[in-house]
Amino acid sequence: MKPLFGEMSLFDKEDLRSASVKAITECKLAQLMSYDLLAICDKYPDIGTR
């Protein structure tokens, strides 16, 4: 699995953060909003079992 952070905020409506990160080299970032995750889970229900 590739390194990730911020996954707790996908499920917590309080918008709390449990981690801070700082890149030490150039990197690429991706953002997944909770409503996008829910749409993906609706379209592909098996994803919730992984």
Image (cartoon, rainbow, N blue to C red):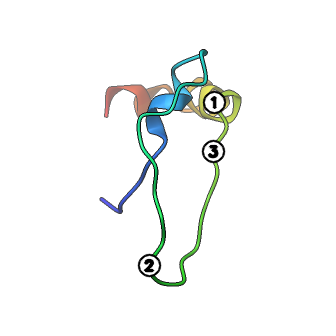
Residue at 60%, 16% in the rendered image? 13
- Which residue does the numbered mark 1 point to in the structure image? 34
Residue 15 coordinates in the image, percent (x, y): 61, 24
Mark 2 vs mark 3: in front: 2
Residue 18 versus residue 31 in the image, above or below: above
Residue 16 coordinates in the image, percent (x, y): 53, 25
Mark 1 is on which residue type? Ser
Name the one closer to the observer, 19 or 33. Answer: 19
Residue at 63%, 30% in the rendered image? 34
Name the one closer to the observer, 9 or 36. Answer: 9
Q: Which mark is residue 24?
A: 2
Q: Judging from the image, what secondary structure is the residue with disc 2 in?
A: loop
Residue at 67%, 37% in the rendered image? 33
Residue 18 coordinates in the image, percent (x, y): 42, 34
Residue 11 versus residue 44 in the image, above or below: above
Mark 3 is on which residue type? Leu
Mark 2 is on which residue type? Ile
Mark 3 vs mark 1, CA separation in Å:
7 Å
Q: Residues within 10 Å of mark 3 (few under 14, many from 20)?
A: few
Residue at 44%, 78% in the rendered image? 24
Q: Do the residues under discs 3 and 1 have CB atoms within 8 angstroms? A: yes
- Which residue does the numbered mark 3 point to in the structure image? 32
Residue 31 versus residue 44 in the image, above or below: below
Q: Residues within 10 Å of mark 1 (few under 14, many from 20)?
A: some
In which quarter of the view is residue 3 placed?
bottom left
Residue 49 coordinates in the image, percent (x, y): 33, 27
Mark 1 vs mark 2, CA separation in Å:
27 Å
Q: Do the residues under discs 2 and 3 have CB atoms within 8 angstroms? A: no
